[in-house]
Amino acid sequence: MTMPIMQDMEHDIMQRNINSRSMQRRLARVGGRALAALLGVAGVAASASGQGQWNVVWTEQFPGSALSSTSWNVLDIAWPHNGEAQYYHPSAVTVSNGLMTITSTNTPRGGRPYTSGRLDTDGKQEFLYGKFEMRGRLPRTQGMWPAFWLLPASDVWPPEIDIMELLGHQPTRTYASNHWGTVQTHQYQTTSWDGPDFSTTFNVFACEWWPDRVDFFVNGTLIATHRNQIPQDDMYVILNTAVGGFWPGYPDTSTVFPQRFQVDYVRVSQWSEPLLRNSGFEASDPQDGANPVKWTRWGNSSRNTQLARQGPAAFKMFGNFNGPGNTTGGWQDMNAQAGERWTAGGMVQSPNWDRIGVGNSSRIRLEFRGASNQLLASHESPQFTRSDAVDTWLERTVTGVAPAGTTTARIVLTHTQGNNAGGAVWWDDVRLVRAVACDSIDFNNDDSLFDPLDIEAFLSVYSEGPCLPVGATCNDLDFNNDGAVFDPLDIDALLRVYSEGPCVQ
């Protein structure tokens, strides 16, 4: 929530004849933790997707003495890529005592001097976006190349997300990478991070793959954020140890065999709310850099790298210069149902060097459509025009409730050229989220609505104190029903609803 919104709320609360000094005294009595959360709520930002939480959708803890055939494939192949020198064989992959172990040896097999293992979930466990975690202990010494990574279910490479790679002669350094393009135009971004000796202890390697970025973590520490050409299609999980190759080099007299890659668990979580694909316009069609993947565009609209709020790109729109009232834009659909409340929003800017012309306007439209793509309802955000601040990212949002017969919610970014004037706008970090319903504002259930004691009671419980007044029965802390408690977003929602605003901004 931005500071102007916070100020508007304070004004609305004052309009309810609440004495501000009295409120300050009440809040001061609540305690430091809750008051700090309240004062810090202006800085709270939900994920790029809106409100929600991570839910575990698949986990592998390697029970018993064999891999699950419903989740894993174990390769039996002389791998033909990267100059690798191992043969991947199922005998190198074992399960015991809650660990999966890939053992790499200097045993010749299939015309290769080394034997190692590789397993994946291709065709069995595939995911679009999510949090991917692996706890493991890695092999070391020259020529070892363990990895925890993702490849596309389409089997068209790239993309590729490497959550963890390690070169055996550098056992304290891990690498995180994102690959994109085509086989002929392959590009990548790699970040290295120095930590403990990953061959002597178990460590957790993870990434959070969002529509507009991939965040990489080691033991919960964020080590990198990549925003270039983020994958937008289902991917599967891979665990392997290569031996030799163009990058790690080949085993030599310093190499010790056998080497073991031991994995304690693999876990995948996904966000509880649907996610708009390519929401930051970071990914483009490999064959057409102007086309943002997963978006349908028309007129003079394109993915553009001249200006961006975050990452390398945004969505640029300008007029068609074919008479007043012509439009240009782009749209994307998400599944929806009747009765759901949806919010479409995004950030828009027009720079001084290409400022939107007089009479032109840009906005977000939220549409609800039926099974035959018929338009059932449409809602528009406030316009962005030449009267708005230049060189400044400004937010535009619109909210609506899906009518009967709805199967699709559509976000439409539009630019209208009113009188053939020039200038352009850029949209970035857009969202289309299903709003959640907030609890009653009568938090302490004393049958008094818009009562400052409800805020006092909420903050008291938030700081692990009693419900107020003592003896009352308070509701749970998940005021916005996003599944997260002790969450500043609940305070944000409580104050917004208290000032007669929407549950979700």
Image: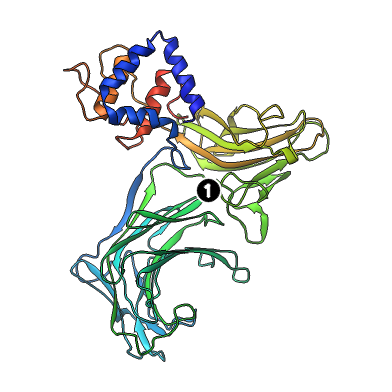
Residue furthest to the top: 17
| x then y, percent, for residue 237 | 39, 64
Position of residue 199 relative to residue 15, above or below, is below
Q: Give how far across and how far down residue 304 sits, in percent.
A: 67, 50
Whether residue 497 is situated above or below residue 327 in the rendered picture: above
Q: Report whether residue 412 is seen.
A: yes
**What secondary structure is marked by label 1?**
loop
Would you place residue 217 above or below residue 238 in this image? above
Residue lying furthest left: 471
Given residues 274 and 383, the one toward you in this image is 383
Which of the 4 image quadrants contains residue 71? Answer: bottom left
Relative to 500, does residue 426 appear above or below in the rendering? below
Residue position marked by numbered label 1 in the rendering: 277
Residue drawn at the location 59% of the way across and 68% of the way down: 186
Q: Residues within 10 Å of mark 1 (few under 14, many from 20)?
A: many
Left-right relation of 194 to 293: left
Horizontal side, residue 247 vs residue 366: left or right: left
Color theme of the render: rainbow
Q: Residue at x 45, y 82 (%)?
A: 249
Visible residue check, residue 480: no
Q: Position of residue 100 (x, y in %)?
A: 26, 70
Horizontal arrangement in the rendering, residue 270 relative to residue 2 (left or right): left
Q: Amino acid at mark 1?
A: Arg
Residue 380 position within the rendered picture, expressed as x and y whole percent measured from the top left: 61, 28
Residue at the image position 55 percent from the left and 35 percent from the top? 345
Count of picture labels:
1
